[in-house]
Image (cartoon, rainbow, N blue to C red):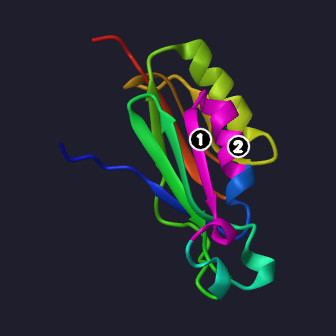
Amino acid sequence: MAQLNPYLNFNGQCEAAFKFYEQCFGGKDLMLMKFGESPMAGDTPPEWRDKIMHAHLNIGQSALLGSDAPPDRFQKPQGFYVSYSLNDPAEAERVFKTLSENGQVQMPLQQTFWAVRFGMVADRFGIQWMINCEKAA
């Protein structure tokens, strides 16, 4: 079975981001592997051993993946959004509010012609999200 999951890169903030996403989305089975815990630990600079080599968080039937990119390879995320779809307007409000804390609202959560609630926000880690609560069919 094929699956498409977003893989996010961070500039040293992956652990904090994934713990935040675990709380925000009610994620399950958070797995964080640090560079210093990997077979590459001996080749890893000491200041980088506590950074995340791979993160995995189950959210509903999807997985959110990520890691800390080495400083010379990190690029600020741009040109995409991670879309989170749900069917409970109150939960959409809660998630949007949580993502907005210390972030930047790009489109307030509101009713649209296709959704009971839709909004766009860049969270405190610079990841852009679309929250979409569709109308019942």
Q: Do the numbered discs 2 and 1 sit on residues whose CB atoms are within 8 Å?
A: yes
N-terminal label among 2 and 1: 2
Secondary structure beneath label 2? helix
- Name the residue rendered at 65%, 66% in the picture: 37
- The three-letter amino acid code for the residue at tag 1 is Leu
Q: Which residue is mark 2?
A: 19
Q: Quadrant of residue 67?
A: bottom right
Q: Which mark is residue 119?
A: none
Q: Quadrant of residue 98?
A: top right
- The three-letter amino acid code for the residue at tag 2 is Lys
Residue 62 position in % (x across, y down) = 40, 37
Q: Is residue 133 left or right of residue 27?
A: left
When the figure is inspected, residue 107 is found, relative to residue 38, above or below; the finding is above
Q: Which residue is mark 1?
A: 30
Write down the region rendered in magenta.
Answer: 17-38
When the figure is inspected, residue 109 is found, relative to residue 107, above or below; the finding is above
